[in-house]
Amino acid sequence: MKLILLGAPGAGKGTVAKLLTRIDGSVQISTGDILRAAIRDDTELGKQAKDYMNRGELVPDSLIMNIMGERLKEGDCKNGYLLDGFPRTIPQAEGLKVLLKNMGEKLDMVVELQVPKDEILDRLTTRRTCSNPDCQAIYNTKSKPSKVEGICDICGSPTIQRDDETVKAITTRLETYDNQTAPLVDFYRNEGLLISVDGTSTDSVINAIKGSLGKS
Ligand code: ADP
């Protein structure tokens, strides 16, 4: 499957993407994960992205389009991909359209995960992520705590709060979503690709996606 997962920070795009990869071998492509890896490795890309990310702002479209232009050509995309956190602006969506056209590919659909604002805020402040770059399992101190506090169940590495999970950065990220990313909902509705699902339950999101794929 070739999907875009659209939704505010904390809507569950990463969690849903990880579950969907188990269905048919599609790969999760998270621009946020790619950028965080670049910051960790202190690459040129990481240096350029770091300050924007820590403030909760978007990194420039040109950087993101370079990353995605390369990433979508890699061999593991042959079985499909779940785009998690990309596109995030209208220019990125237009850029993706051109990339896909040049590669002769079509998206199956764009899934909008709808989650109420108060739940989003609650989820973001209680989210913990495994610090091991090869694992990155996601926990929540309230709804999905790790068995031992602060330690990942899967790989035993410490779980951490991301640098952009301060209240200030979270507020900026949510405003950025409303201003720059939410317009993509209409963009993809006009393209006839949009399905909107209630994102409060991960299981029902997965079932809704499976149902829609079956029909398409
Ligand atoms: P979330 O969806 O929870 O905000 P992500 O990991 O997707 O988390 O993104 C974290 C940060 O990485 C964003 O706030 C932004 O600074 C940067 N980023 C990720 N993807 C993009 C993108 N497609 N365009 C611009 N910036 C991006």
Image (cartoon, rainbow, N blue to C red):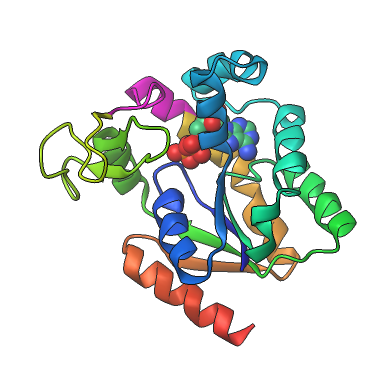
- In percent of width and height, residue 30 lies at 55, 43
- Report the image quarter containing ligand 1: top right
Q: Residue at x 86, y 51 (%)?
A: 98
- In percent of width and height, residue 15 lies at 39, 53
Q: Residue at x 34, y 44 (%)?
A: 120
Q: Residue at x 86, y 63 (%)?
A: 104
Q: Residue at x 30, y 48 (%)?
A: 119
Segment tinted magenta in the rendering = 160-172
Compared to residue 45, the image places residue 68 above or below, namely: below
Q: Residue furthest bottom?
A: 215
Of residues 26 and 160, the one drawn nearer to the viewer in this rendering: 26
Compared to residue 158, the image places residue 99 above or below, namely: below
- In percent of width and height, residue 122 lies at 26, 41
Q: Quadrant of residue 22?
A: bottom left
Q: Quadrant of residue 95?
A: top right
Res 157 visible = yes
